[in-house]
Image: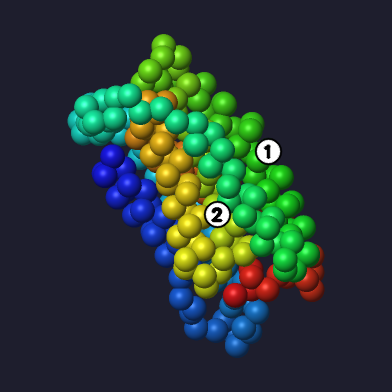
């Protein structure tokens, strides 16, 4: 399980580094144009990183070369065979609730923008995750059903964590850590519950972040009312 925690933390750090990259020199002495270009480049980097992680997880799942999934499952069976909990069924939604609590005490226009992005993100997860499960045909570790890849719970948790950090947690590392930490905990609990393979978790995390970033591209804040948190 330690290996899964390490990989999830590395992926979160890498994606956050892409999304929060430092500034660049001005473009034609136009700071706003430079910022827009910089933001667009960071979004593309994030989407490419998530896509690469999903593809890598699928290849690792199907490949017998590294056998990561079976190794982590063997460790789980040896040390946590009787482990059962339903905490992950509820924890996946915790960042969403946290976002509304913080939003209600702050800028209401930011809360509305957050809600619109949440709606689009949830729609993508609800429609695309079942299709990916059907297409990938990865057998569950504890049943005969072929619908393990990617983990829907993990996708939901990481999408919610990304949305809440985008809107309410900029320059607040403790809150960022709590949001993504809870999402990573959901992924690990899915493995401990013997519901998913480790690669299902990695793909779910990448897909959740991917959908949240796509919603940022599809849903634009109202002109002249770009939120304070998004600007920072």
Q: How many marks?
A: 2
Return the disc, 2 or 1, that comes first in the chain's sequence: 1
Q: Residue at x 35, y 28 (%)?
A: 83
| Among the 4 quarters of the image, the one containing residue 37 | bottom right
* Image quadrant where one finds the N terminus: top left
How packed mark 2 is, by other alpha carbons closer than 10 Å (few <14, some 14-19, many 20 or more), is: many
| Among the 4 quarters of the image, the one containing residue 65 | top left
| Among the 4 quarters of the image, the one containing residue 196 | top left
Name above or below for residue 202 compared with residue 36: above
User: In x, y percent, where is residue 4?
Assistant: 31, 43
Name the residue that disc number 2 marks.
Answer: 162
Name the residue that disc number 1 marks.
Answer: 123
Q: Residue at x 37, y 32 (%)?
A: 191
Name above or below for residue 215 compared with residue 144: below
Q: Nearer the viewer, residue 91 or 132?
A: 91
Label at residue 19: none
Q: Nearer the viewer, residue 215 or 34?
A: 215
Q: Nearer the viewer, mark 2 or mark 1?
A: 2
Mark 2 residue element: helix
Pointers 2 and 1 in contact (C-beta within 8 Å): no
Asked whether residue 206 is in view, the answer is no
Q: Nearer the viewer, residue 61 or 88?
A: 88
User: In x, y percent, where is residue 174?
Assistant: 47, 66
Asked whether residue 191 is in view, the answer is yes
Mark 1 residue element: helix
């Amino acid at each position: 399980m330690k290996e899964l925690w390490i990989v999830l933390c590395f992926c979160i750090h890498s994606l956050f580094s892409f999304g929060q990259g430092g500034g660049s020199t001005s473009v034609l002495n136009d700071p706003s144009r430079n910022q827009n270009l910089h933001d667009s480049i960071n979004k593309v980097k994030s989407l490419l990183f998530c896509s690469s992680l999903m593809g890598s997880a699928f290849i690792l799942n199907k490949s017998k070369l590294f056998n990561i999934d079976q190794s982590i499952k063997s460790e789980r069976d040896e040390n946590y065979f009787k482990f059962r909990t339903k905490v992950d069924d509820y924890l996946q939604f915790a960042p969403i609730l946290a976002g509304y609590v913080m939003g209600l005490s702050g800028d209401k226009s930011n809360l509305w923008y957050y809600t619109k992005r949440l709606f689009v993100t949830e729609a993508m997860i609800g429609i695309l995750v079942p299709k990916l499960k059907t297409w990938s045909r990865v057998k569950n570790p504890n049943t005969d059903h072929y619908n393990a890849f990617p983990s829907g719970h993990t996708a939901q948790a990481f999408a919610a964590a990304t949305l809440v950090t985008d809107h309410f947690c900029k320059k607040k590392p403790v809150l960022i850590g709590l949001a993504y930490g809870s999402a990573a905990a959901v992924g690990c609990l899915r493995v401990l519950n013997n519901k998913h393979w480790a690669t299902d978790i990695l793909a779910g995390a990448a897909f959740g972040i991917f959908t949240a970033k796509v919603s940022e591209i599809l849903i634009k804040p109202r002109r002249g009312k770009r939120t304070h948190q998004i600007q920072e």
